[in-house]
């Protein structure tokens, strides 16, 4: 089958009038009887939209109040679970389950609702199997697919409350459940006959209890999808694999009193299938018809109304719309209701859009299932040809600024020469999204290849043990979306990052090729690792500590009291053979770490660090790198993190002095609140042989203010933009911090501070100055970074301060950064010859006295808007209605408006950023780029 051909610039809204008519029949509230011919409901259904089974308890019966109209407060987690259980016990249309538990142990329940025939266990399994078969045209014929589309229901997901404080979608989902479980109208029957609806009221119960966006570890779960580091995300994705959706709703809240549903804002990722975009846009028309309230927003109607084509894009593969769309072929959609509205209005509007969406999906289920099969058929053909999908835009006023280059990609190879455990972790991440990965059994030659980092190569030998990912498979779209060296943004609008290439995040050795290669290889069915042979009882098992996965194993073993030594030249760790139990072997296998038999253990002893986590002035303990440290170091690595406050350092208390490592996360203070005495205490403590670990803004600035570094911050040009991008770095492999890293590596930069090189320490990672400088994603003036430092190791006495210009713990998916942090935590004691006098020398004193660079972005980034220089007066006037702190500058015919964001809020949680962009669009100010 020929690859699908999508419009290059615009996605047309096809059959919109028909969709609107259908929704007027199906989706309005109160419920209307349905006369659609699509899989018509049995004649026993009622024309009375209020007819319901009396045996199914209403929300008011169980909760004591109605949902939607008349509701005065939101539902609690306990009430969510109670109501799901009550409906399950009373209705033969509903089955419930628990998809996972939260960090604090709360269950995340779900309900599956359809007609009573569909929800019987055997029937439900068969429906799910049939839909999964549509995802693989190699084993499903077109005739079988057509029969499935005719006879089987589609699967629709309704999810909510991924951000804990955004609660109304969960309450609306319970109302939707009640209507589907109890309703006797033809509108209900058509939905249940044509759909299996999976309802997940809350994806973040811990955050809901705390009225906090993030989960208990401070992670934004709507940025965690591709990496699935958090257990709430991981369990959800496993349920999605069990019941793969064709339509997926992710219900949110935002500021104000309006409502957003798609069509989306640009950019949209090029590997999202055209069928899904078409469904999303047509569902948008259905939602317009079923919305009610004040209809569309305009200059005079500004509350309890809806808008489209704004703010919410489909680009980053961490969202609850992009991943269901790209990874599962669904119409994944974000719905956002303004949180300033009354509870009743918020819940009722969320219900209207949920109900309208279900009505559209039921009326079009056969077409959707036919198209669903086409998505995977086209993906196979594209993968076989090595074709990438073209870029497109969906907003009528936009044009593609950056087309996908003319590339052919038929295969990816992950090479096993280094960071092998992280390579295997990536293999498992891919396999758990149904990607087929093969282990190469015999070396094979690749005539022409591209090496990650922008280089070409010829006649590359791919060795035995490498991993091969052919594009000729149904998950071609997902493979390219997470493996691609660059995401090729079509339009420069960002409220998240511009790169998430998994090989670059891990810093592993990978290539891709247009060549048709069929190596001798075997399908990977489980992770490799563990003992590779049997060691002598007096011998050892060794492994390279060169990856985040190996670091996790190391800390786990140290926490169990297993003695470890490390060769400080090779980075190899040795375990006494007698200490490698079945449990240790199984742990190594699960992490992809191979244990190689060796001789007697030899090397420098590794000790478990006693880590203090700074939570003083400027540090948020509910988000950002403080939470990331609690998750990575605390949960995954098992370290007992102890809180250290500003007062602890200033007063030199045991809470501070008793630690061997102090980790200072990113934050908003340049001094951490330390007094001169506190700074002296910090220097003395380090001088005794301890380690200071400073991350990004606050972590590096506190060290500078205390006289621990000679680095200073370089001023960023007016048009400087590095929007969550990867850059090549040179590595000083003689540094213990870099032990096990390659000579050239990649690090993730998200508008981080730019550090001048240290003159008093070791510049562990630096950005190249010559032709090897390379960046992906979206950057402007990235050359400013050339020759600057990304990681610095500053000795003081017998200890050191290790400073990261970037956040190595970012979202716990920057594996190369995690490995560097592990090395810093395990830093060996300095020999006397390498020790530096604890006092503050002239270079460090000069750096401490330098003016502090304003922190415009908090733990994130400032809002930056680029317009033509001639449009600056109009832009400044509009921005002035929202902020008096904006900074403006001009360069090369463009004007840049930078709005401070001291709380580090992203665009979708910022109090006015979305409204500002809309105001500029309404004033017809052409936006050259928007970064939030």
Image (spheres, rainbow, N blue to C red):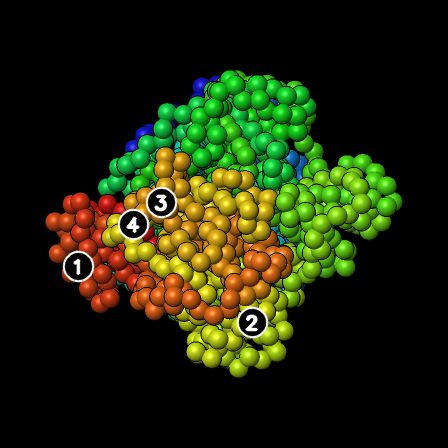
How far apart are the alpha carbons under marks 1 and 2?
49 Å
How far apart are the alpha carbons under marks 1 and 3?
32 Å
Q: Quadrant location of the C terminus?
A: bottom left
Residue under pointer 1: 876
The residue under the point 20% across, 58% down is 888
> Residue 293 at x, y = what percent?
33, 59
Label 4 sits on a secondary structure element that is loop
How far apart are the alpha carbons under marks 4 and 1?
20 Å
In the image, which disc is placed on residue 685? 2
Label 3 sits on a secondary structure element that is loop
The residue under the point 46% across, 65% down is 708
Residue under pointer 3: 786
* Precedes in sequence: disc 2 or disc 3: 2
> Residue 354 at x, y = what percent?
46, 52
**Is 415 left or right of 756, judged from the image as shown?**
right
* Precedes in sequence: disc 4 or disc 1: 4
* Precedes in sequence: disc 2 or disc 4: 2
Pick the front one: 676 or 597: 676
How far apart are the alpha carbons under marks 2 and 4?
38 Å
In the image, which disc is placed on residue 720? 4
Pick the front one: 26 or 14: 14
């Amino acid at each position: 089958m020929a690859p699908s051909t999508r419009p290059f610039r615009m996605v047309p809204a096809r059959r919109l009038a028909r969709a609107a008519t259908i929704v007027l029949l199906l989706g309005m509230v109160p419920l209307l009887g349905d006369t659609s011919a699509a899989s018509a409901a049995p004649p026993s259904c009622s024309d009375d939209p209020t007819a319901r089974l009396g045996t199914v308890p209403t929300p008011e019966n169980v909760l004591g109040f109605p949902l939607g109209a008349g509701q005065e407060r939101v539902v609690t987690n306990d009430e969510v679970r109670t109501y799901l259980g009550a409906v399950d016990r009373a209705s033969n249309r509903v089955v419930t389950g628990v998809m996972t538990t939260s960090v604090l142990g709360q269950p995340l329940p779900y309900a599956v609702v359809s007609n009573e025939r569909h929800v019987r266990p055997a029937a439900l399994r068969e429906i799910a199997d049939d839909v999964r078969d549509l995802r693989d045209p190699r084993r499903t014929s077109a005739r079988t697919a057509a029969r499935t589309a005719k006879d089987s229901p589609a699967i629709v997901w309704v999810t909510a409350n991924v951000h804990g404080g955004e609660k109304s979608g969960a309450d609306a989902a319970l109302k939707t459940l009640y209507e589907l479980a109890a309703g006797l109208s033809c509108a209900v029957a058509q939905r249940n006959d044509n759909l299996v609806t999976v309802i997940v009221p809350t994806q973040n119960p811990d955050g809901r209890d705390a009225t906090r966006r993030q989960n208990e570890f401070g992670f934004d779960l709507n940025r965690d999808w591709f990496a699935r580091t958090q257990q709430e995300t991981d369990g959800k994705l496993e349920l999605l694999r069990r019941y793969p959706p064709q339509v997926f709703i992710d219900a949110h809240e935002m500021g104000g009193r309006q409502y957003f549903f798609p069509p989306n804002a640009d950019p949209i990722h090029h590997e999202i299938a055209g069928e899904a975009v078409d469904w999303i846009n047509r569902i948008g028309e259905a939602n317009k018809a079923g919305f009610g309230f004040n209809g569309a927003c305009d200059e005079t109607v500004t509350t309890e109304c809806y808008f489209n084509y704004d703010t919410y894009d489909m680009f980053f593969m961490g969202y609850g719309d992009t991943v269901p769309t790209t990874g599962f072929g669904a119409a994944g959609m974000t719905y956002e209701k303004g949180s300033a509205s009354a509870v009743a209005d918020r819940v009722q509007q969320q219900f209207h859009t949920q109900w309208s969406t279900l009505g559209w999906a039921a009326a079009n289920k056969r077409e959707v299932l036919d198209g669903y099969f086409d998505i995977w058929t086209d993906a196979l053909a594209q993968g076989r040809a090595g074709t990438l999908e073209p870029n497109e835009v969906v907003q009528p006023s936009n044009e593609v600024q950056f087309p996908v280059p003319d590339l052919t990609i038929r295969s990816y190879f992950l090479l096993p020469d280094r960071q092998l455990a992280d390579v295997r972790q990536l293999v498992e991440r891919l396999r758990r999204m149904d990607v087929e990965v093969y282990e190469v059994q015999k070396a094979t030659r690749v005539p022409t290849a591209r090496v990650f980092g922008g280089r070409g190569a010829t006649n590359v030998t791919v060795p035995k043990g490498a991993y091969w990912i052919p594009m000729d498979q149904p998950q071609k779209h997902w493979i390219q979306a997470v493996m691609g060296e660059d995401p090729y943004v079509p339009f420069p609008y960002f409220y998240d990052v511009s790169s998430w290439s998994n090989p670059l995040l891990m810093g592993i050795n990978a290539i891709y090729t247009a060549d048709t290669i069929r190596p001798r290889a075997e399908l990977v069915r489980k992770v490799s690792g563990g003992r590779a042979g049997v060691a002598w009882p007096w011998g050892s098992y060794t492994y390279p500590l060169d990856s985040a996965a190996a670091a996790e194993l190391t800390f786990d073993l140290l926490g169990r009291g297993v003695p470890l030594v490390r060769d400080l030249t090779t980075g190899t760790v040795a375990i006494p053979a007698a200490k490698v139990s079945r449990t240790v072997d199984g742990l190594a296998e699960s992490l992809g770490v191979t244990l190689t038999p060796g001789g007697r253990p030899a090397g420098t002893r590794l000790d478990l660090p006693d880590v203090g986590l700074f939570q003083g002035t400027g540090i948020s303990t509910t988000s950002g790198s403080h939470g990331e440290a609690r998750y990575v170091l605390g949960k995954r690595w098992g370290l007992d993190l102890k809180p250290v406050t500003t007062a602890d350092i200033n007063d030199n208390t045991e809470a501070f002095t008793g630690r061997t490592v102090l980790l200072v996360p990113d934050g908003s203070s340049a001094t951490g609140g330390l007094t001169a005495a506190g700074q002296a205490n910090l220097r003395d403590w380090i001088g005794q042989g301890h380690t200071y670990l400073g991350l990004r803004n606050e972590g590096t600035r506190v060290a500078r203010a205390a006289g621990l570094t000679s680095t200073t911050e370089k001023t960023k040009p007016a048009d400087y933009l590095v929007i969550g991008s990867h850059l090549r770095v040179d590595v000083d492999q003689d540094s213990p911090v870099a032990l096990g890293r390659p000579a050239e590596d990649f690090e993730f930069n998200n508008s981080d501070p730019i550090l001048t090189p240290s003159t008093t320490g070791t510049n562990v990672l630096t950005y190249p100055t010559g032709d090897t400088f390379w960046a992906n994603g979206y950057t402007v003036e990235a050359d400013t970074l050339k020759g600057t430092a990304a990681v610095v190791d500053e000795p003081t006495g017998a200890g050191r301060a290790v400073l990261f210009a970037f956040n190595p713990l970012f979202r716990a998916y920057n594996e190369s950064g995690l490995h560097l942090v592990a090395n810093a935590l395990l830093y060996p004691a300095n020999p006397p010859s390498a020790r530096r006098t604890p006092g503050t020398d002239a270079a460090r004193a000069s750096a401490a006295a330098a003016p502090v660079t304003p922190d415009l972005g908090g733990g994130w980034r400032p809002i930056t808007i680029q317009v033509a220089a001639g449009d600056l007066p109009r832009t400044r006037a509009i921005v002035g209605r929202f902020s008096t702190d904006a900074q403006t500058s001009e360069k090369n015919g463009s004007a840049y408006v930078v709005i401070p964001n001291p709380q580090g809020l992203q665009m979708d949680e910022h109090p006015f950023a979305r409204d500002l962009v809309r105001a500029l669009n309404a004033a017809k100010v052409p936006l050259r780029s928007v970064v939030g």
